[in-house]
Amino acid sequence: MIKKNFEERRQNKVQPIVVDLAVIGGGLAGVCASLTAARSGLKVVLVQDRPVLGGNASSEVRLWSLGATSHMGNNNRWSREGGLINEILLENLKRNREGNPLIFDTVLLEKVYEEKNITLLLNTVIYEVVKKDDVTIESAHGFCSQNSTTYHIKAPLFCDASGDGIVGFLSGASFRMGAEDAAEFEEGFAPNVQDYGNLLGHSMYFYTKEMKRPISYTAPSFAIKNAAELPRIKNYQLGDHGCKLWWVEYGGRLDTIHETENIKFELWKVIYGIWDYIKNSGKYPEAANLTLEWVGTIPGKRESRRFEGDHMIAQKDIVEQRDYFDSVVHGGWAMDLHPADGIYSKHSSCTQWHSKGVYTIPYRCYYSRDIQNLFLAGRIISATHVAFGSTRVMLTCALGGQAVGQAAAICSKNNWKPKALADQDKIQLLQLALNRNGQSIPRVKVNDTLDIATKATITTSSQLQFDGFATGQDWKPLTFSAAQLLPLSANTLYAFIFEVEALEDTELEIQLKISSANNHFTPDVTLQAETYALKVGQHQVAFNLNAGLSEKKYAYVCLMKNEKVNVKVSEERCSAIMTVFNRINKAVSNYGKQEPPSDIGIDSFEFWTPERRPGGKNLCFSMKPALDVFQSPNLINGEVRPLSTGETNVWIAEKNEDTPSIRYDWAQAVAIKTIRVFFDADYDHALESTLMEHPESTIPFIVSDYTITDGDGNLLTDVTGNYQAINTITFNEAVKTNTLVFKFSKKHPHIPVSVFNISVYEHSI
């Protein structure tokens, strides 16, 4: 029994926490920052003001996480985010390919819960920052409503991933809120604030459920009565739920921080009013058996504060794909702005303009230019309003979180402030660490001098000489133009033969396209076009290049749209080769071609995009000479995805080899502590975390079963059931040997074994 007599005043329990890094905000950016730093040996506290992790990706909001692949609706080939967030997405795919947001909660919670170096504080709100001096944070104070405990968190380094930037704000860091004038950064896409508005609003979603009997509905008194008059009501399709209702948005003309509760209540009014209209207007008789199963209780925020770093990424950085010496993250979502009036606006629900390829974000965007020990992560990084329209999406934020977590580990080890790491002589430490962990910074070449695999002689049991895809049983109509994307060598006269079927007498045009620059996959240059007269029936059509490419490059062999023609497709698939289509994806403002106004500084170009599996089958064709681009040196070049310059960066075994092998031989015995194997995670396939169902629970290109032995045949590792892109094998005691032999088991009959990279180290990494 506890009994207390009257006291003049009491204080909550106070618990001090001293760590190496304090991360405030438990969205994907904060989770990735915390896990990365903790795995690198730092003691971390992760403070989240909600009961679950994930932020907008959690079951509280239920927004799917997306990034550079943009629902597979742009030209950013092999661009899905790698590293830690890819590990999380592949874990979610394995357990939760149906996209249940509650399961995704558990995936995130498990990752953090199992990390011994992380102290997790849920339901804890930071309300005060104590500064050591004008430019240094000493501690942050938070309160947990569930255990009535006040936490005094002290750390030499802080990361603000809180969305609204509470730590940056309280510490006095420079920030912006709202749209810049177009002239400040020469941004033609900057909005007219009076008409379009300053800020993107909040959204809330609802879920419905089929009950197999009529369900009545009485709206609450606060529900709007004029849902039929909403300009966006035309967006609703019966059965839409969750984040397909992203257009239920409001608040861009209000203070999106301090008026969030008012915005939330207005969204409740709208949602219950929309459901009243659907159930009771008589215009949706098919909704008779539907009930309202779930409505969000907190809104998903898009925009509030953006803090200033030593660089501010802007529209030209994205459109021109400018690269910087300190690039650490890539982005690829469209510059995506929404009218401030949201659900009440007569403007289109959003305006999206894509760049031709992925862009990079400098490290200097990820720390405050004022507060010396404050990292920035998530949507609050140093970006203009226009650039923020792209950098704000969650998988881009997650990559930034990994960069910050790794930077914190390096700064802690060297007793540096975040700004010190931005030095041109030091930034490669961060780029190397990120590359080792699969982050893959575009157009940044990192030399890993500690990888002893580069000193070995490599022998493989076979090597694919690619000469086309075998004939299949299915035909695909050329409703859209279809292209086989191939890594062609320079100065080579390739000859192709395609199998087609004419439904009536017609003509078929075949084109050869390439990209105009080496930093994107947009096929904006046509090198050759041939037209073939076809009679009714099946044909083999030969397309022969009349000139070789001037340099090795990915090229598009395009069978142009003709609904009177079918092309035969294959069951075979192959790493680093795919089929794309000049098709429409309205969800990301892809209408086959992007045609922006001429005065806003954005490119016009066609979209050639993949189909999701089980679609996206390759074309049946043969080619001569065969492609000799899957050699063993690809295993040690440090790259783990194909590049637009034509490098596949992958070793592939012959199609018919069931147990291919790779052998590493060193001239002298080496002491091996760590082996890291990188498989093909199909970085072109979007892995939305919530709502969307995926066709399989594992990526078909990833090798699930393999062994590693030494030169005498002694088994070092036997891996079964693998579904992750990166496998790290660390031995308790270093293994001394001259030889490593990797033997892989083929998983799918129509997919040859492939490996992107194998690194070997004499220490733990």
Image (cartoon, rainbow, N blue to C red):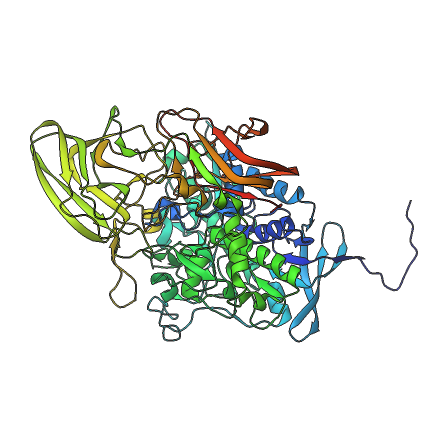
Rendered image quadrant of residue 182: bottom left
Place of residue 762 in the rendered image (x, y in percent of width and height, measured from the top left): 60, 44
* Left or right of residue 544: residue 385: right
Q: Which residue lies furthest to the front in this view?
A: 667
Place of residue 136 in the rendered image (x, y in percent of width and height, measured from the top left): 66, 71
Q: Residue at x 50, y 68 (%)?
A: 177
Compared with 416, 519 (above or below) is above
Q: Which residue is drawn at 55% across and 40% down?
A: 668
Q: Is residue 548 or residue 587 the one in the foreground? A: 548
Q: How many labels does the image show?
A: 0
Regarding residue 477, the answer to whether it shows in the image is: yes
Q: Is residue 328 or residue 91 the one in the foreground? A: 328
Place of residue 383 in the rendered image (x, y in percent of width and height, measured from the top left): 46, 65
Compared with 273, 143 (above or below) is below
* Left or right of residue 452: residue 730: right
Q: Which residue is drawn at 35% across and 39% down?
A: 630
Regarding residue 223, the answer to whether it shows in the image is: no
* Left or right of residue 441: residue 583: left
Q: Is residue 256 or residue 331 the one in the foreground? A: 331
Place of residue 146 in the rendered image (x, y in percent of width and height, measured from the top left): 72, 49
